[in-house]
Image: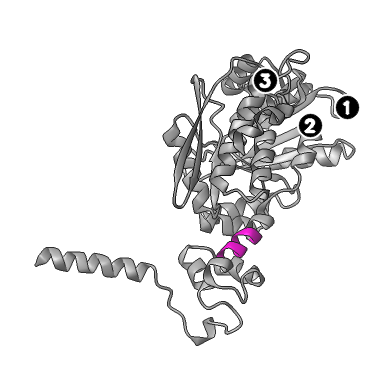
Amino acid sequence: MFEKIRDDISSLRKEMNGMIVTDQSGISDKLSHQTPIKLRQEKFSSEIINKLNYSFIGKNLEDGRVSFFRELSRKLASNDFSRLLKSKNIFIFGNSGSGKSTLAAKLASFLSDAKQTKKINFFEVSNSSTGLSDVLKSYSRVLGFNLNDYKTFDFKNYIDTSEWINIFDFSGELNFSIQKIKEIKNSFPSFDFCSILTVQSGSNSEMINGITKKVEDIRPMVAITKLDECWVGAEEFSSLAINNARIGMVTGTKIISVEDMIYAANELIEFGAKNVLIKGGHSRNKIVKDVFVNNKDIKIFNSVRYNTNNTHGTGCTLSSAVTTFVSCGKPAKKSCELGIKYVNSAIKTNPNYGKGHGPINHLTSIKVNRKYN
């Protein structure tokens, strides 16, 4: 008997936690009746719901939620990433412990691969007198990039035509970093740079409000870091959107096993994606495992790994191939299967042009066309 009472109380508590108490003035006949209430239950702030209400007015619950998420994504997504790729000077700053140095290393590695260059410098910007940080020293040694104190950098006589990419890691406390960036900006107005603000996952809405207000004058791109440690949810995204933050990067999810890939795919499903394909080419296994996930199905595609450096463009080719098969009327899962087979065959028959990481054979479709009729 006591167990039944305890279960009833627990069930009642769950129902009450999902309720929103309001009066008649809190409901508008112009809005879809269920969508704003559902979004509030999911912890999105009333401010961002009201701000984006045009996205779901007149739509049913499912369509309204999808439209809201799309509009929220547009509001949060940064359009500065192309500028970042072209920039020769990148400032990375944020609260202590928010993953600035790790992001600097990841970005340096990415730019080195993307631009096929080793001409990258790390500069540590610090008010400490103890010397350069051990973390940045380690990344510098592993990646083979120079590490310097920012005081050695000649801001005044900097030549924009230089081939070198300079990544400035502003270590330490946020207020010091903001002050230093403003000093550089005011003292050297012709010095061009891109700025990235690291916001650690798990930061609550109050913390996000405080950080974003402090950096209004700098207007940095936001990088959400340490997603392998904490979660970023509706409340945090609401705060970022209200404060006009623009997210250009997310880092931290560790993808090691197939189980990790499935977990990551389900996280993306939770954000509103209908179908997710996660590539497995990053693994070291002889069999490459690509994972397809939607709300009804999980499919693992197995492919032979070929021992070659000629894999440049596999991601772009795969996405294009999948899109092509979808446009031909094939279901999403089948399109992923055919796209993976096409790319795998293109890797196998690569033309072996030039040196380094060469291209795959996009004309392989002529050979495999009959196979997938």
Label 3 with label 1: CB-CB less than 8 Å: no
Residue drawn 77% across and 34% down? 85
Residue drawn 56% across and 27% down? 281
Q: Closest to the observer: 372 or 278? A: 372
Where in the figure is residue 88, as x and y percent of width and height? 81, 30
Identify the residue under disc 1: 158
Q: CA distance from mark 3 to mark 1?
A: 46 Å
Label 2 with label 1: CB-CB less than 8 Å: yes
Q: Closest to the observer: 251 or 177? A: 251
Quarter occupied by the N terminus: bottom left
Please provide the residue range marked out in magenta. Answer: 65-71
Please rate how many residues cluster around mark 1, counting C-alpha atoms within 10 Å: few if below 14, some from 14 to 19, many from 20.
Answer: few
Identify the residue under disc 2: 89
Which amino acid, mark 2? Asn
Where in the figure is residue 197, as x and y percent of width and height? 66, 42
| Number of numbered markers | 3
Residue 350, compared with residue 328, is above or below; it is: above
The label number, if any, that marks residue 191 in the structure image: none
Quarter occupied by the C terminus: top right
Identify the residue under disc 3: 349
Where in the figure is residue 232, as x and y percent of width and height? 51, 49
Residue 56, compared with residue 311, is above or below; it is: below
Element assignment for label 3: loop
Which amino acid, mark 3? Thr
